[in-house]
Every structure is written in structure tokens, then in C-alpha cells.
Amino acid sequence: MSAVLAGARQADAASARDTMPLLAVRGLKAQYGPTQVLHGLDFEVATGGITTILGANGAGKTTTLRAVCNMVRSSGEIVLGGERIDGLATEAIVRRGVAHVPDGRGTFLHLSVEENLRLGAYSRKNRSDIEPDFERIYGYFPRLKERHRQQAGTLSGGEQQMLAVSRALMLRPRLLLLDEPSFGLAPLVVQHLFEMFRTINAQAGIGMLLVEQNAAMALKLAQHAYLLETGRVVMSGPAEAIRSDETVRRSYLGY
Amino acid sequence: MNALLHQVLSGLASGGIYASVALALVMIYQATHLVNFAQGELAMFATYLAWTLIQAGVPYWGAFAITVACAFVAGVAIERIVVRPVENAPILAVVIVFIALLVIFNSLAGWIWTYTIKPFPSPFPSQPLFGNSYVSSHELGSMAITLAVLLLLFVFFRYTPLGLAMRAAAQNPESSRLVGIRVGWMLALGWGLAASIGAIAGMMVAPTVFLEPNMMGGILLYAFAGALLGGIDSPGGAVLGGFIVGVLENVVGAYVGTELKLTVALVIIVGVLVVRPSGLFGRVHVTRV
């Protein structure tokens, strides 16, 4: 009898794990000085899924990502794979497998491309399999291989964005936070980058939280979307549904 | 000709000392964008520690190793206890902290060991090596030690993950946190390393200038001139600058007059700031407004 119960409990736990989101955020608030910029956000990223947060300039998209990594004063519950991570130091959150491609790309301008990538793997415990990852990443972005000895500051904007994504991948993250990766890039480069996101998501099963102004691209990539206006979620749902919504179409997609 | 060669060689020997201290200055500068005025006094204090150990009967190299280790720990402690709290304070507040450290260590040394000049032993034989008449064995030995230290540091910063992380933390703290580097500890380690380098420089220079609380004053000035000459944000440049200043100082001292030795350092400092503020190898800083 008890064996049967234990078995049932195990099955329950297993199914809970399957449906448990990779990232679950409840009541996220953040402020800069006296100004509150996030007013209690709730959102989730499914395991292996891609979620996008859309919104105009100043809606609080970048702040949301920074709050997940504890880089701004914030409160609320942040759960990564069942473990509370709110209040942990940024370094500790990174060590739990959250890689952040920040606003402005965060390139180490005076270090070489290869050193930038090596730093991405800095907090990995197992160092023996770092070298194969270089090859994997150079496979995704051959331009970086050509320039691996060059100072990162001499790369073009698109190449620096590839480098920023690659640096994040070197962590072998569970969750990738992408802050406006399309910003300032030529449309063709953006397309290539988003194709890479799709490939990486499919091959490595890395969950992604994508913040974008380019709503059309983001909604094509993501399965789930949230619409942010002045620090509040005003709409959420499957990306398909959001894309066909009349208001979104008019104010964010422009047709 | 022989006399000139002699002056150049012994200039290189003191240049090695200036180069080490200049490198220590650059390491702190890269992390804080400030010159640590207390760098010389830390080195002097460490040298007194070595002297005390040797007086107590510890063999020279044992005292050397203990001193380097203690200086490292002290450097880390100073960063964590004194410098960290003023991390985000206005620049002048941090400058005051550095000057306070200078005064504190200076008076503390005078209080503990008095201001009487003390001889400090050299680990190298008093006879010139290889029967040459150009350089004393202490000059040759201290040059070898400083070069070894510089080489070790180069390898450490260039080829080890920790060295890379320290460079990254000094350059871009926010991105460093995002790859999981404990930036605070990296800066503290930098202070520890700088203090250790200073301690070695102090022990190498003490046999020539004699041990007293003010022994590093002039050396810090030469090192600062060297660092500025090479570029205050370029470790390699600072090292080269230190050697150049050492040679210039010695040659001017011999052919123009010892009175003008310190003037050389000041002329270099002012000259660099006027003609090429970023130094020979430094980066030109452009601020977007």
C-alpha cells in the first residue's frame, strides 16, 4: 500500500517538475530612488520555452531583466527551477545558470574576443569541456572565430551582439535573458541573430526571456508574450494570440 | 664610456624598483582610477617587518617570504576595511583616505621602530659577480628579482583564469558580475598583489637607501613619474617608464649633479602631463558629453 502511495507521489513530483516553469516571477516591484518603475509584475518562462516582454521605451523592460539578476533595488518573488533566487547577489544568480545579455551588450572592450568568451565560462564548475564549447559557438558565429584574437572593442555592432550572446552561452545557462538584441543592428543581422536564437533554443533547450522593441520579430520567435506599459502587464498570452490582437497590431506592429 | 655604462646599469637596477612600484600603482589605478599615495609607506612598513624578522634570527629568504605573504594579507584587509566603504564616495574623500593611510603608516613606523636610520641586509654577496666592475651583485640580484616578479605577474594576468577575471573586474565591473565574477574580491586581491609587489621593492631598495620611515618617499615619486611616462593605465608602459626614469635619474645625477635627481622626476611628471597626458602607451580618454 505504502509502496503504491510512494510511487504515486513520485509520479506527482515528476509531473510537477514537467509543468513547473523554469522562471516564475510574482509581484515584482522595482524603483530607482523615489521613482517606482515596476508595479508588481507576474510572469513566467516555461522550461525550454521562449517568452517575450514587449513595450515602448520606458515601459520597464530593461528594469525587469535587471531585477531578475538583482541589479536594481527590487522586491517580489523570483523562483528559478523551484528555488527562490530573489535577494541573492548577481554573481550567485549567474552561478545558478542565468546568463544576461545586457542592454548595451556589456562587451569587455579592451580584451580579445577569445578572452571575452573565456570569461563567459568563468563560473562553470567543470572546466574540461570548455574547449569544445568554443568550437560549438564558433560554429554558430563563424565571424567570431575569424576575429578571435582581435580586441573586442574593434568589432562592429552586430559582431559585438553575437559576442555578447556567445559570452552568455559559454556559461551553459538554463535561462538566457536577452535585452533588446536587435537594437541598432541592420535588419539582415537581426534576422540572422534571431535564427540563431531559434537554433540554440531547439538544440540546447535553453529557456529565453526576450525583451524587445521589435515586436514583429519577437512574436515570431516566442511562444508566450507579455505587454508592458509603464511598469504594469497590460496584456499577456500565447504569442499567436497577441500577434493577432487588434490593439497590439496597430500600436506595436504598425499595420 | 665605462663610467656611463656603469651609470646606465645601476640606473636599470633602481629602475627595476621604480618599475615594480609603478606597476603596483597602475594595478590600483586600473581598479579605482586613483593613485594610491600610501603605496610607498605600505612597502616601507613591510620592509620594517622583514627587518624585525631578520633581527629575530629568521633567515633572509624566510623573512622575505613571510613579509610578502603578510603584505598580501594586509593589502586585502586594507581594501576590505578602509577602501570599500568609500567606494562610491566623491574622489576627494578617497584621496583623503589614501593620504591618511600614508601618514598613519609613516608615524606608526616611526613610533614602533624610531626614525633612526637602520642598515638592511642584502641577500647577495658583497663581491661583484663574475668579476665585473660595472655592477654590484646587489644591483644585479635585485634586477633579477624584480624582473622575475614582473614576469610572474605577466604570466598570471595573461594566462590564468583568475588573472583574466581580475583584469575584467577592473575594466567592467557590471559585466564581470554578469559572468559570475566576485568583483569585490578581485579588487581586494589586486590590493594584496600590489602590496606584495611593493614589499619586494622595499626589501630590494632598503640596502641602498637604508631603512627609515621616509625611505620610500622619493621612490614613490620616481615610480609615479615612470607610471605617467609609460601611461598610467598601461602595466607594460609603466614598467618600461620605471626603467627609463631609473636610468635618466642616475645619468643626470652623475653628469649634472645629485641635487637635480628628484627634479628629473618632477620634470618628467610635468612634461608628460603637458605634452602627452596619456603617456607613451596609455589610452587616450575621450568622454562623450
Image (spheres, grey):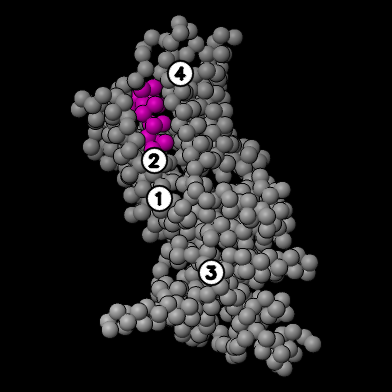
Other-residue count near label 3 (Cα within 10 Å), few / some / many at <14 / 14–19 / ≥20? many
Residue A169 visible to an observer of this rendering: yes
Q: Is residue B172 left or right of residue A80?
A: right
Magenta stretch contains residue B205: yes
Stretch in magenta = B195-211
Residue at the image point whose x is 42% and y is 15% from the top: B137
- Contact flag, marks 4 and 2 (Cβ < 8 Å): no
Q: CA distance from mark 4 to mark 2?
A: 23 Å
The amino acid marked with disc number 2 is Ala
* Front: mark 2 or 1: 1
Which of B264 and B282 lies nearest the eye of the viewer? Answer: B282
How busy is the neighbourhood of tag 1: few (under 14 within 10 Å), some, or many (20 plus)? many
At which x and y percent is residue B105?
32, 42
Q: Residue furthest left?
A: B56
- Within 10 angstroms of label 4, few (less than 14), some, or many (20 or more) residues? some
Quadrant of the rendered image containing residue A180:
bottom right
Measure the alpha-carbon separation of dots 3 and 4.
56 Å
Q: Amino acid at mark 4?
A: Leu
Question: Of the numbered discs in the image, which one, if any, rests on residue B195?
Answer: 2
Crowding at label 2, few (<14), some or many (≥20) Cα neighbours within 10 Å?
Answer: many
B204 and A47: which is toward the camera: A47
Mark 1 or 4 closer to N-term?
4
| Three-letter amino acid code at the position of disc 3 | Leu
> Can you identify the residue that label 1 sits on?
B188
Q: Nearer the viewer, residue B196 or B274?
A: B196
Q: Are marks 1 and 4 on the same chain?
A: yes
Nearest-to-viewer mark from 3 and 4: 3
- Indicate which disc residue B140 carries: 4
